[in-house]
Image: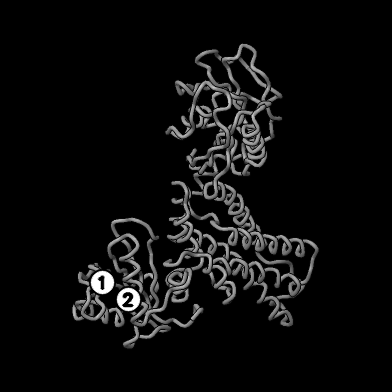
Amino acid sequence: MDSYTDFAPIAARATPPGESALAVIRISGGGNALGDASDCGALKLLEKCFSRPAVLRAAQGNSVVYGWMIDGAEKVDEVLISVYRAPKSYTGEDGADICCHGGDAAPRAVLNLLLKNGFRQALRGEFSYRAFINGKVDLSRAEAVMEIVGAKGERALAGSVRRLSGALEAEINAVKKLLLDVVCEVELNLDYSEVDGVGSEDAGLPTKESVLAALSRLDHLLALYQTVKLEKEGALVALVGRPNAGKSSLFNLLLKEERSIVTEIPGTTRDWIEGWIEIDGIPVRLADTAGIHEAADKIEQIGIERSAALATSADFVLTIIDGADANPPKPPLQMPGSGLLVWNKCDLNPMPDNFCLDGKRCIAVSAKTGAGLPALVKAIAKELRHLAGSAEEGAAAASTGDAPGTDRQRSLIASAKTALQETLALSDNNAPLDIIAPRLRDALDALGEITGEVSNAGILEAMFGNFCVGK
């Protein structure tokens, strides 16, 4: 059944396919107000294919049971089962994590056995969906689960963990509290506008300071999101330059491994090569490109054209100059607004004081000795944060986790901000309260969607449908 709402016992792999020592199969279902606590619950069904059903039946929540998964008299795999009893489980239902041998065959056999004995294959994100429906997590925490899975760096992970711990939920609730106080006073004025001395629908917006405070906090969240997005998604940084400028050597130095072939023969790099590194908490997809020059070789020319196209589409470009050249030529490409000049081989020929090209500052490094590398890395991080509209000092603040972590959350915060700006504009133009009140409610509804207080089935299925199976 292709539905998130049948609450049948479900099963899915919680670990990806591939060679590994262990794998985990997750099950859930039954034991809560929405589920089925009868003999069709997840733990009851599991007893049918477990070698020690009485031990499993007697197991307390948050305990581990050893035994075999069995199909009749045939053993399928030796397992450890972590037992969870409702409501003290991730989903709020009875459930278990079955730890079996890794690889492909054993986990597949265990999962097929479960499906054969009454379980349904879980849909994408269905475990987290049930956790939300059963009040175990709000939507911001549910989304943080997938943020953690997709985190590429330590800072992105730290922010996601704090959102999972409820930091964003707490901040959104604090903003809503400010607005609810205003709404209550507005509603009081509207309800009693006909009672002398109690209120008036033409009265000015009450506690305007609370609306301004809420707007300021929303602005702060939107500003932090630029840092969060950069630390989550990273940036493409391309190394470009003429042949033998030392691009591949610098690429290998930054990656701390020998990825690119380095020789004195011009044109050694025929196509671009890439690798991931982390710079000041920012995931960077670093690309070493072919030397830009006029090439007679057709294959080499194709590589040069591809490199030029990559440099054009990159978020940031490091243009490498051969400092050992007595008269370093200008960069082979027109310098984009987002880039740095790098004077390589400063160990052979120091960079002249205050050297620059086309008004761009240049940083001296030696890919051979590592001289100047810390300064280059620091400059790259600073420029990337600047390009993303993220203040360098904002990185630490974003790691507190109270910043939005997804485009959905950012969009809803922006909608709430717009509604508050319109509220203040109406108030400044002396609009009656019955015109102002709906905009305040719009702001509250937008914030309610972030945590899931305001939601519908279509939104929920679209969101959880982007999760992993087993989450």
Mark 1 Cα-neighbour bin, 10 Å: few <14, some 14–19, many ≥20: some
- Whether residue 383 sits left or right of residue 262 in the image: it is right
Name which quarter of the figure residue 265 lies in. Answer: top right
Percent position of residue 233, x then y: 55, 49
The three-letter amino acid code for the residue at tag 2 is Leu
The residue wearing badge 2 is 113
The residue wearing badge 1 is 76
For mark 1, give the secondary structure.
strand
Percent position of residue 371, x then y: 47, 21
Task: Tell me what residue is drawn at x 49 percent, y 77 percent.
Answer: 4
Task: Give the mark, 1 or 2, whose residue is nearer the N terminus.
Answer: 1
Tell whether label 2 touches label 1 (CB within 8 Å): yes
Percent position of residue 445, x then y: 62, 70
Give the farthest residue toward the top. 326
Mark 2 Cα-neighbour bin, 10 Å: few <14, some 14–19, many ≥20: some
Task: Tell me what residue is drawn at x 53 percent, y 62 percent.
Answer: 174
Residue 199, numbered label? none
Percent position of residue 2, x then y: 51, 78
User: Looking at the image, is 188 positioned above or below residue 337?
Assistant: below
User: Looking at the image, is 272 positioned above or below residue 202?
Assistant: above
The three-letter amino acid code for the residue at tag 1 is Val
- Whether residue 181 sits left or right of residue 260 in the image: it is right
- Nearest to the observer: residue 336 or residue 91: 336
Where's the C terminus, which quadrant?
bottom left
Name which quarter of the figure residue 440 lies in. Answer: bottom right
User: Looking at the image, is 384 positioned above or below residue 416?
Assistant: above
Give the farthest residue toward the bottom. 38
For mark 2, give the secondary structure.
helix
As measured in the structure, the alpha-carbon distance from the residue carrying label 1 to the one carrying label 2 is: 8 Å
- Whether residue 60 sits left or right of residue 19 in the image: it is left
- Nearest to the observer: residue 448 or residue 125: 125
Name which quarter of the figure residue 408 lies in. Answer: bottom right
